[in-house]
Image (cartoon, rainbow, N blue to C red):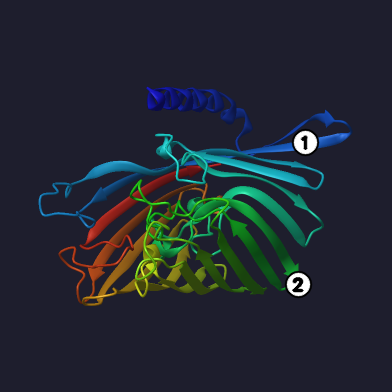
Protein backbone atom coordinates (compact mmCIF):
# COMPACT_ATOMS: atom_id res chain seq x y z
CA UNK A 1 0.00 0.00 0.00
CA UNK A 2 2.83 2.40 0.95
CA UNK A 3 4.61 1.92 -2.37
CA UNK A 4 1.39 2.58 -4.31
CA UNK A 5 0.86 5.85 -2.43
CA UNK A 6 4.45 6.93 -3.08
CA UNK A 7 4.27 6.04 -6.76
CA UNK A 8 0.97 7.91 -7.12
CA UNK A 9 2.45 11.00 -5.49
CA UNK A 10 5.45 10.88 -7.80
CA UNK A 11 3.24 10.62 -10.86
CA UNK A 12 1.22 13.60 -9.66
CA UNK A 13 4.45 15.55 -9.22
CA UNK A 14 5.53 14.65 -12.76
CA UNK A 15 2.34 16.05 -14.28
CA UNK A 16 2.39 19.14 -12.05
CA UNK A 17 6.01 20.04 -12.78
CA UNK A 18 5.58 19.06 -16.42
CA UNK A 19 2.84 21.68 -16.79
CA UNK A 20 5.27 24.38 -15.62
CA UNK A 21 8.43 23.31 -17.47
CA UNK A 22 7.49 24.36 -21.05
CA UNK A 23 7.38 28.01 -19.96
CA UNK A 24 10.41 27.75 -17.70
CA UNK A 25 12.84 25.49 -19.55
CA UNK A 26 16.33 26.93 -19.54
CA UNK A 27 15.14 30.07 -17.73
CA UNK A 28 15.98 31.26 -14.23
CA UNK A 29 12.90 32.46 -12.37
CA UNK A 30 13.30 35.26 -9.85
CA UNK A 31 10.64 35.33 -7.12
CA UNK A 32 9.44 38.44 -5.31
CA UNK A 33 11.60 40.05 -2.65
CA UNK A 34 11.75 38.19 0.65
CA UNK A 35 12.56 40.77 3.29
CA UNK A 36 14.69 42.72 0.84
CA UNK A 37 16.42 39.59 -0.53
CA UNK A 38 15.69 38.10 -3.96
CA UNK A 39 15.28 34.36 -4.12
CA UNK A 40 16.53 33.05 -7.47
CA UNK A 41 15.01 29.80 -8.71
CA UNK A 42 16.31 27.68 -11.59
CA UNK A 43 14.56 24.53 -12.82
CA UNK A 44 16.46 21.71 -14.54
CA UNK A 45 15.77 18.19 -15.71
CA UNK A 46 16.56 15.50 -18.26
CA UNK A 47 15.33 12.15 -19.54
CA UNK A 48 17.54 9.36 -20.84
CA UNK A 49 15.67 6.63 -22.73
CA UNK A 50 17.71 3.57 -23.64
CA UNK A 51 17.81 0.60 -25.98
CA UNK A 52 20.10 -2.39 -25.50
CA UNK A 53 20.88 -5.59 -27.34
CA UNK A 54 22.94 -8.40 -25.87
CA UNK A 55 23.14 -10.18 -22.54
CA UNK A 56 26.35 -8.73 -21.17
CA UNK A 57 25.28 -8.68 -17.51
CA UNK A 58 23.58 -12.09 -17.44
CA UNK A 59 23.78 -13.77 -14.06
CA UNK A 60 22.87 -17.25 -15.19
CA UNK A 61 22.63 -19.42 -18.26
CA UNK A 62 18.80 -19.36 -18.04
CA UNK A 63 18.56 -15.54 -18.32
CA UNK A 64 16.69 -14.87 -21.58
CA UNK A 65 17.32 -11.10 -21.79
CA UNK A 66 19.56 -11.25 -24.84
CA UNK A 67 17.40 -9.44 -27.43
CA UNK A 68 16.46 -5.80 -28.02
CA UNK A 69 14.92 -4.16 -24.97
CA UNK A 70 14.08 -0.62 -23.88
CA UNK A 71 14.49 1.21 -20.59
CA UNK A 72 15.67 4.42 -18.96
CA UNK A 73 18.91 5.34 -17.22
CA UNK A 74 17.66 8.57 -15.60
CA UNK A 75 14.42 10.56 -15.52
CA UNK A 76 15.14 13.58 -13.32
CA UNK A 77 13.71 16.93 -12.27
CA UNK A 78 15.11 19.44 -9.85
CA UNK A 79 15.72 23.00 -8.85
CA UNK A 80 18.54 25.21 -7.64
CA UNK A 81 17.85 28.07 -5.24
CA UNK A 82 20.04 30.98 -4.23
CA UNK A 83 19.51 34.00 -2.00
CA UNK A 84 22.54 36.19 -1.49
CA UNK A 85 25.17 33.78 -0.08
CA UNK A 86 22.76 30.94 0.71
CA UNK A 87 22.07 28.17 -1.84
CA UNK A 88 20.14 24.91 -2.09
CA UNK A 89 19.55 22.06 -4.53
CA UNK A 90 16.95 19.33 -4.90
CA UNK A 91 17.13 16.60 -7.55
CA UNK A 92 14.78 13.63 -7.81
CA UNK A 93 14.96 10.58 -10.07
CA UNK A 94 11.69 8.92 -11.06
CA UNK A 95 13.50 5.74 -12.07
CA UNK A 96 13.94 5.21 -8.30
CA UNK A 97 10.22 5.57 -7.56
CA UNK A 98 9.88 2.60 -5.19
CA UNK A 99 10.57 4.82 -2.19
CA UNK A 100 13.15 2.51 -0.58
CA UNK A 101 16.14 3.89 1.28
CA UNK A 102 19.36 2.71 2.88
CA UNK A 103 20.11 3.08 6.56
CA UNK A 104 21.16 6.64 7.42
CA UNK A 105 20.10 7.98 3.99
CA UNK A 106 17.14 9.73 2.41
CA UNK A 107 14.81 7.88 0.02
CA UNK A 108 16.57 6.60 -3.10
CA UNK A 109 14.29 8.78 -5.23
CA UNK A 110 16.13 11.83 -3.84
CA UNK A 111 19.50 12.12 -5.56
CA UNK A 112 20.48 15.48 -4.06
CA UNK A 113 18.96 17.55 -1.26
CA UNK A 114 21.35 20.09 0.22
CA UNK A 115 21.63 23.61 1.59
CA UNK A 116 24.81 25.63 1.79
CA UNK A 117 26.55 28.94 2.34
CA UNK A 118 29.17 30.69 0.18
CA UNK A 119 31.59 32.64 2.33
CA UNK A 120 33.03 34.24 -0.81
CA UNK A 121 33.87 33.24 -4.40
CA UNK A 122 36.44 30.72 -3.11
CA UNK A 123 35.08 28.96 -0.03
CA UNK A 124 31.71 27.32 0.68
CA UNK A 125 30.08 24.74 2.95
CA UNK A 126 27.02 22.56 2.41
CA UNK A 127 25.04 19.91 4.29
CA UNK A 128 22.56 17.32 3.09
CA UNK A 129 22.50 14.38 0.66
CA UNK A 130 24.96 14.74 -2.21
CA UNK A 131 27.88 13.05 -3.95
CA UNK A 132 30.92 12.24 -1.88
CA UNK A 133 34.09 13.75 -3.42
CA UNK A 134 35.79 10.53 -4.59
CA UNK A 135 36.07 9.86 -8.32
CA UNK A 136 36.29 12.19 -11.32
CA UNK A 137 33.83 10.41 -13.61
CA UNK A 138 31.45 9.75 -10.70
CA UNK A 139 31.36 13.48 -9.93
CA UNK A 140 30.51 14.30 -13.54
CA UNK A 141 26.82 15.00 -14.13
CA UNK A 142 24.86 12.05 -15.53
CA UNK A 143 23.69 14.38 -18.31
CA UNK A 144 27.28 15.03 -19.46
CA UNK A 145 28.82 11.56 -19.62
CA UNK A 146 30.97 10.69 -22.63
CA UNK A 147 29.46 7.18 -22.92
CA UNK A 148 25.98 5.80 -22.27
CA UNK A 149 26.79 4.27 -18.87
CA UNK A 150 28.82 5.17 -15.86
CA UNK A 151 31.77 2.85 -16.04
CA UNK A 152 33.20 0.04 -14.00
CA UNK A 153 34.91 2.37 -11.50
CA UNK A 154 31.56 3.55 -10.05
CA UNK A 155 31.16 0.33 -8.04
CA UNK A 156 34.15 1.35 -5.90
CA UNK A 157 33.19 4.95 -4.98
CA UNK A 158 31.36 5.95 -1.79
CA UNK A 159 28.27 7.11 -3.71
CA UNK A 160 25.99 9.81 -2.30
CA UNK A 161 25.55 10.18 1.44
CA UNK A 162 24.10 12.51 4.07
CA UNK A 163 26.83 14.73 5.44
CA UNK A 164 28.66 18.04 5.44
CA UNK A 165 31.42 19.24 3.13
CA UNK A 166 33.76 22.22 3.08
CA UNK A 167 34.97 23.23 -0.38
CA UNK A 168 37.48 25.62 -1.90
CA UNK A 169 37.89 26.56 -5.56
CA UNK A 170 40.35 28.56 -7.66
CA UNK A 171 42.78 29.03 -4.81
CA UNK A 172 45.66 30.86 -6.42
CA UNK A 173 43.66 30.58 -9.62
CA UNK A 174 44.51 26.86 -9.92
CA UNK A 175 43.83 24.70 -6.86
CA UNK A 176 40.70 23.37 -5.17
CA UNK A 177 39.64 20.93 -2.47
CA UNK A 178 36.68 19.15 -0.83
CA UNK A 179 36.67 17.79 2.74
CA UNK A 180 33.59 15.89 3.92
CA UNK A 181 32.21 13.88 6.82
CA UNK A 182 29.16 11.71 6.16
CA UNK A 183 26.92 9.01 7.49
CA UNK A 184 28.30 5.56 6.50
CA UNK A 185 28.18 5.03 2.74
CA UNK A 186 25.25 2.60 2.81
CA UNK A 187 24.07 3.70 -0.66
CA UNK A 188 27.30 2.16 -1.98
CA UNK A 189 25.78 -1.31 -1.74
CA UNK A 190 28.71 -2.89 -3.58
CA UNK A 191 31.27 -1.78 -1.01
CA UNK A 192 29.18 -1.90 2.18
CA UNK A 193 27.59 -5.22 3.19
CA UNK A 194 24.00 -4.11 3.88
CA UNK A 195 22.23 -7.06 2.32
CA UNK A 196 21.25 -8.77 5.56
CA UNK A 197 18.92 -7.28 8.17
CA UNK A 198 20.65 -9.02 11.08
CA UNK A 199 23.89 -7.08 10.60
CA UNK A 200 24.36 -3.75 12.35
CA UNK A 201 26.23 -2.08 9.52
CA UNK A 202 27.26 1.53 9.27
CA UNK A 203 25.07 3.04 11.99
CA UNK A 204 24.71 6.83 11.68
CA UNK A 205 25.92 8.46 14.89
CA UNK A 206 28.21 5.54 15.65
CA UNK A 207 30.08 5.05 12.37
CA UNK A 208 31.11 7.58 9.73
CA UNK A 209 32.41 8.00 6.21
CA UNK A 210 35.15 10.47 5.36
CA UNK A 211 36.31 11.79 2.01
CA UNK A 212 38.86 14.33 0.83
CA UNK A 213 39.76 15.52 -2.66
CA UNK A 214 42.43 17.88 -3.99
CA UNK A 215 42.44 19.19 -7.54
CA UNK A 216 44.24 21.50 -9.92
CA UNK A 217 43.08 23.22 -13.12
CA UNK A 218 45.60 24.81 -15.43
CA UNK A 219 44.40 25.96 -18.84
CA UNK A 220 42.90 22.84 -20.49
CA UNK A 221 44.34 20.37 -17.96
CA UNK A 222 42.44 19.09 -14.90
CA UNK A 223 43.95 16.70 -12.33
CA UNK A 224 42.65 15.38 -9.01
CA UNK A 225 43.48 12.99 -6.19
CA UNK A 226 40.90 11.73 -3.68
CA UNK A 227 40.59 9.33 -0.73
CA UNK A 228 37.64 7.99 1.24
CA UNK A 229 36.73 5.63 4.09
CA UNK A 230 33.44 4.09 5.26
CA UNK A 231 33.56 2.55 8.72
CA UNK A 232 32.13 -0.85 9.69
CA UNK A 233 31.69 -1.90 6.06
CA UNK A 234 31.08 -5.50 7.13
CA UNK A 235 28.71 -4.73 9.97
CA UNK A 236 29.72 -4.83 13.62
CA UNK A 237 27.85 -8.09 14.27
CA UNK A 238 30.91 -9.88 12.91
CA UNK A 239 33.48 -11.13 15.39
CA UNK A 240 36.85 -9.44 15.19
CA UNK A 241 38.83 -11.19 12.50
CA UNK A 242 38.59 -11.50 8.73
CA UNK A 243 35.45 -9.40 8.24
CA UNK A 244 35.60 -6.41 10.58
CA UNK A 245 37.38 -3.78 8.51
CA UNK A 246 36.65 -0.27 7.26
CA UNK A 247 36.35 0.07 3.50
CA UNK A 248 38.87 2.49 1.98
CA UNK A 249 39.28 3.80 -1.55
CA UNK A 250 41.63 6.16 -3.35
CA UNK A 251 41.41 7.64 -6.83
CA UNK A 252 43.67 9.60 -9.18
CA UNK A 253 42.42 11.12 -12.43
CA UNK A 254 43.18 13.68 -15.11
CA UNK A 255 41.53 15.15 -18.19
CA UNK A 256 42.67 17.35 -21.08
CA UNK A 257 40.13 19.16 -23.22
CA UNK A 258 40.42 21.24 -26.35
CA UNK A 259 37.67 22.44 -28.65
CA UNK A 260 37.41 19.16 -30.56
CA UNK A 261 39.50 16.69 -28.53
CA UNK A 262 39.09 15.13 -25.09
CA UNK A 263 41.60 12.90 -23.31
CA UNK A 264 40.91 11.32 -19.90
CA UNK A 265 42.31 8.73 -17.56
CA UNK A 266 41.43 7.47 -14.09
CA UNK A 267 42.60 4.83 -11.61
CA UNK A 268 40.64 3.77 -8.53
CA UNK A 269 41.48 1.13 -5.93
CA UNK A 270 39.24 -0.18 -3.15
CA UNK A 271 40.46 -2.16 -0.12
CA UNK A 272 38.53 -4.38 2.31
CA UNK A 273 35.41 -4.59 0.12
CA UNK A 274 32.30 -5.15 2.27
CA UNK A 275 34.61 -5.05 5.28
CA UNK A 276 36.46 -8.25 4.35
CA UNK A 277 40.16 -7.88 5.09
CA UNK A 278 42.36 -8.05 1.97
CA UNK A 279 39.41 -8.27 -0.44
CA UNK A 280 40.64 -5.71 -2.95
CA UNK A 281 39.69 -4.45 -6.40
CA UNK A 282 41.01 -1.84 -8.81
CA UNK A 283 39.76 -0.29 -12.05
CA UNK A 284 41.42 2.02 -14.56
CA UNK A 285 40.33 3.51 -17.85
CA UNK A 286 41.75 5.56 -20.71
CA UNK A 287 39.47 7.69 -22.87
CA UNK A 288 39.81 9.62 -26.13
CA UNK A 289 37.15 11.63 -27.92
CA UNK A 290 37.29 13.66 -31.13
CA UNK A 291 34.53 15.92 -32.43
CA UNK A 292 35.10 15.69 -36.17
CA UNK A 293 31.88 17.54 -37.03
CA UNK A 294 29.82 19.97 -34.89
CA UNK A 295 27.13 17.28 -34.57
CA UNK A 296 29.35 14.20 -34.36
CA UNK A 297 31.93 13.00 -31.83
CA UNK A 298 33.73 9.67 -31.94
CA UNK A 299 34.88 8.15 -28.62
CA UNK A 300 36.88 5.17 -27.47
CA UNK A 301 37.31 4.14 -23.83
CA UNK A 302 38.93 1.06 -22.35
CA UNK A 303 38.25 -0.18 -18.80
CA UNK A 304 40.36 -2.76 -17.03
CA UNK A 305 39.37 -4.28 -13.66
CA UNK A 306 41.35 -6.56 -11.37
CA UNK A 307 39.89 -8.40 -8.36
CA UNK A 308 41.99 -10.02 -5.62
CA UNK A 309 39.91 -12.15 -3.21
CA UNK A 310 41.01 -13.26 0.24
CA UNK A 311 41.27 -16.81 -1.06
CA UNK A 312 41.10 -18.21 -4.56
CA UNK A 313 42.24 -16.96 -7.95
CA UNK A 314 42.43 -13.30 -8.94
CA UNK A 315 40.33 -12.38 -11.98
CA UNK A 316 40.41 -9.67 -14.65
CA UNK A 317 37.79 -8.06 -16.86
CA UNK A 318 38.08 -5.53 -19.66
CA UNK A 319 35.40 -3.46 -21.41
CA UNK A 320 36.17 -1.39 -24.50
CA UNK A 321 33.56 1.20 -25.54
CA UNK A 322 33.45 2.26 -29.18
CA UNK A 323 31.01 5.15 -29.41
CA UNK A 324 29.39 7.85 -31.48
CA UNK A 325 27.77 10.92 -29.90
CA UNK A 326 25.26 12.77 -32.07
CA UNK A 327 24.52 16.31 -30.84
CA UNK A 328 21.15 17.44 -32.18
CA UNK A 329 21.83 20.92 -30.79
CA UNK A 330 25.57 21.47 -31.43
CA UNK A 331 25.65 24.82 -29.58
CA UNK A 332 24.44 23.16 -26.35
CA UNK A 333 25.64 19.63 -26.99
CA UNK A 334 24.10 17.95 -23.94
CA UNK A 335 20.64 19.47 -24.46
CA UNK A 336 19.62 16.90 -27.09
CA UNK A 337 21.83 14.01 -28.08
CA UNK A 338 21.93 10.39 -29.17
CA UNK A 339 24.70 8.11 -27.92
CA UNK A 340 25.59 4.82 -29.58
CA UNK A 341 28.05 2.37 -27.98
CA UNK A 342 29.40 -1.04 -28.88
CA UNK A 343 31.05 -2.66 -25.84
CA UNK A 344 33.67 -5.38 -26.32
CA UNK A 345 34.28 -7.66 -23.31
CA UNK A 346 37.77 -9.08 -22.72
CA UNK A 347 40.06 -10.35 -19.99
CA UNK A 348 41.52 -13.63 -18.77
CA UNK A 349 38.31 -14.58 -16.98
CA UNK A 350 35.84 -12.13 -18.50
CA UNK A 351 33.67 -14.36 -20.68
CA UNK A 352 30.94 -16.54 -19.27
CA UNK A 353 30.27 -14.34 -16.21
CA UNK A 354 33.18 -15.68 -14.14
CA UNK A 355 34.69 -12.34 -13.07
CA UNK A 356 34.72 -12.34 -9.27
CA UNK A 357 34.71 -8.60 -8.49
CA UNK A 358 31.92 -6.17 -7.64
CA UNK A 359 32.21 -3.88 -10.66
CA UNK A 360 29.29 -3.75 -13.08
CA UNK A 361 31.29 -4.56 -16.17
CA UNK A 362 29.84 -6.37 -19.17
CA UNK A 363 30.76 -10.03 -19.40
CA UNK A 364 29.85 -10.31 -23.09
CA UNK A 365 29.66 -7.91 -26.03
CA UNK A 366 26.63 -5.58 -26.05
CA UNK A 367 25.13 -2.75 -28.11
CA UNK A 368 23.87 0.30 -26.18
CA UNK A 369 21.89 3.35 -27.29
CA UNK A 370 20.60 6.36 -25.37
CA UNK A 371 18.45 9.35 -26.38
CA UNK A 372 18.67 12.34 -24.04
CA UNK A 373 16.75 15.59 -23.83
CA UNK A 374 17.76 18.03 -21.11
CA UNK A 375 17.11 21.59 -20.04
Which residue occupies 37% across, 69% down? 300
37 left or right of 209? right
Q: How many marks?
A: 2
Where 88 falls versus 179 (above or below)?
above
Residue 219 visible somewhere in the drawing = no
Q: Quadrant of residue 124?
A: bottom right
Viewer-nearest residue: 55 or 234: 234
Which residue occupies 66% across, 49% down? 127
Q: Quadrant of residue 340?
A: bottom left
Instruction: Please tell me whether mark 1 sits on a helix, a strand or a loop.
Output: strand
Which residue occupies 32% across, 65% down? 322
Q: Would you name the residue on which mark 2 appears? A: 173
Expressed as whole percent of the image width and height from the top left, the position of residue 111 reads: 52, 45
Viewer-nearest residue: 170 or 355: 355
- Quarter of the image that includes the N terminus: top left
Residue 231 visible somewhere in the drawing = yes
Viewer-nearest residue: 49 or 154: 154
Q: Quadrant of residue 131?
A: bottom right
Distance from disc 1 to disc 2, alpha carbons, whole Å, reads 29 Å
Expressed as whole percent of the image width and height from the top left, the position of residue 90 reads: 60, 40
Where 38 falls versus 183 (above or below)?
above
Q: Would you name the residue on which mark 1 appears? A: 39
Which residue occupies 58% across, 30% down? 21
Expressed as whole percent of the image width and height from the top left, the position of residue 177 reads: 67, 68
Amino acid sequence: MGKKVISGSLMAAVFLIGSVIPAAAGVSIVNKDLGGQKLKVKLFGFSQITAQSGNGLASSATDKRDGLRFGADRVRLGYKLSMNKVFSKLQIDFVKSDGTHKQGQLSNVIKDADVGYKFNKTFSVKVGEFKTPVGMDFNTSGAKLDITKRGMEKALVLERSLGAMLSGRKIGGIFGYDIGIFNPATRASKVVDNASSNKIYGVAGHDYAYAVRGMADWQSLHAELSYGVSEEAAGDSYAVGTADKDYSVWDVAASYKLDVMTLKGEYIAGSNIKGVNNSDESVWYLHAGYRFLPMLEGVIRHYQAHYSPVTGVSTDLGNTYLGLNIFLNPKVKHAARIQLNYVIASGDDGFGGTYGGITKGYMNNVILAQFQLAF
